[in-house]
Amino acid sequence: MVSRPRRIAIVPRSVRFLPALLLLALTACGGGDGGPGAGAPGLGDPYFPKAGNGGYDVGHYALDLSYDPARRHLDGTATVTARATEDLSAFNLDLAGLKVEEVTVAGERARFSRDGQELTVRPPRPLDRGETFETRVRYAGTPRTLTDPDGSREGWLFTEDGAVALGEPMGSMTWFPGNHHPADKASYELTVSVPEGVEAVSNGEPSDERTRGGRTVRTWRTEEPMASHVATLAVGDYAVRRSTAAGHPAYTAVDRSEGEPDAVDELPGVMEWAEYNFGPYPFTSTGLIVAPAGVSDYALETQNRPVFPGAPDTALLVHEIAHQWFGNSVSPESWRDMWLNEGFATYAEWLWEEDQGGESARERFESVYAEDDPELWSFPPAKPSGPAHISDRPVYDRGAMVVHRIREQVGDDAFYDLVQGWTARHRHGNADTEDFTRYVEERVPDEDFDEIWADWLYGEGKPDSPR
């Protein structure tokens, strides 16, 4: 996100198919005697161990939803197409709340049970490793709003005339069942029915719209891989506009209570600047959603279309657009790697200010370094001190300081080559901190980065000021 850095006003929150932690989960939970076993109920993420599930890899989600804002009631059918990565007698999906009415696997009814956020599915016959299978879950109820370990709200956030779905880190499981960990990305098709006159905006591009019997049905498609925590759905009284930004289709949705925010007109310039600095835009459309002010206390880098709680300023827009490269296309391998999202998106703000003739990135670095804020130095960016702190200042500002130290050491030409090479190498994939440090050292072999890693990335406390 901008993911809520500095908790003052509004803050921003933002290819390996099977990363190491997933492989470990599969190995630990497969059938010990060579027969089919139950997929792991979590991937063992260091901060959210129940997030995700082992034993399969999702390729596509087809979500068919119907929402009644007046009753706050959601009816849904989720069709999850996946490939088994081991022989499976059972597997799990993440789903918090809502009543499951029926589950089928490969068109046959399957037994299921619930335990907290775990929906355990037992297919009528075992699934073979390598088999592609389709699971359909029919469910209904009032979606939940969750409270994160840091006290912020996510999941299904109600508004006066609708709702906004925000998913980082675990909120998406409140409105559809899935493998909810950034390590497992998939394509999406979301079809949603709402009362006539109510808008429904999601990720990707609209592909169909029809109105009948007092209800409007809209379909949105996302072809590029997307992690579930950056999937979104905004329902309400929105003014929706289609235009272009830096040559890409742009869809903007602004709650009518927010008027005409400057961000809509600033988007093309920010997109052009970001492509110049970070490399080709990784998705087929762009845009933004300006939700009613106060719906949340943070903005979120939802894919293609970041969500803002009220009209954003330019810095926040830059931050969330930068996340389309850092966090959405190149996604973290675990939630411990959040600094790779937030450090780069925060540094994008510094670069934008510098390029607009304002404070230089070096001046910003020195200003942050001079602050007398114990929180800033409470832990290193690569080692957040628990799930309640993955959106704290060290992840954002100290993460940006790491990026700046690299830039100063290698020079601007090599720095921008590094950045664009990084977004190209892991486009639509996942990466962790070790991937990044190894990549930097490989691309600039004549430089010694040990001090940056030891003092700025992993080091405890406030480092000595660099020359």
Image (spheres, grey):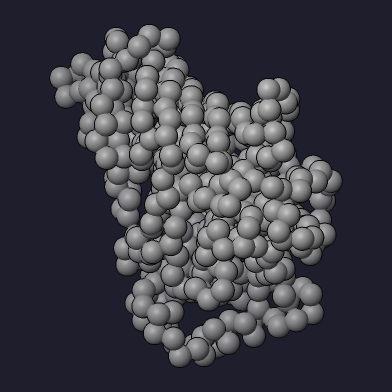
Whether residue 162 is visible to the viewer of this picture, yes or no, is yes
Residue 118: % across, % down: 30, 35
Q: Nearer the viewer, residue 209 or 355?
A: 209
Whether residue 84 is visible to the viewer of this picture, yes or no, is no
Q: Nearer the viewer, residue 201 or 376?
A: 201
Residue 366 vs 198, above or below: the answer is below
Residue 88 vs 116, above or below: the answer is above
Image quadrant where residue 126 sits: top left
Residue shown at the point (82%, 59%) measured from the top left = 265
Task: Give the side of residue 16 with respect to residue 345, left or right.
Answer: left
Task: Give the side of residue 23 with respect to residue 241, left or right.
Answer: left
Residue shown at the point (46%, 53%) measured from the top left = 154
Task: Give the side of residue 102 with respect to residue 77, left or right.
Answer: left
Residue shown at the point (43%, 9%) measured from the top left = 107
Image quadrant where residue 300 sits: bottom right
Residue 257: % across, % down: 71, 59
Q: Nearer the viewer, residue 77 or 412?
A: 77
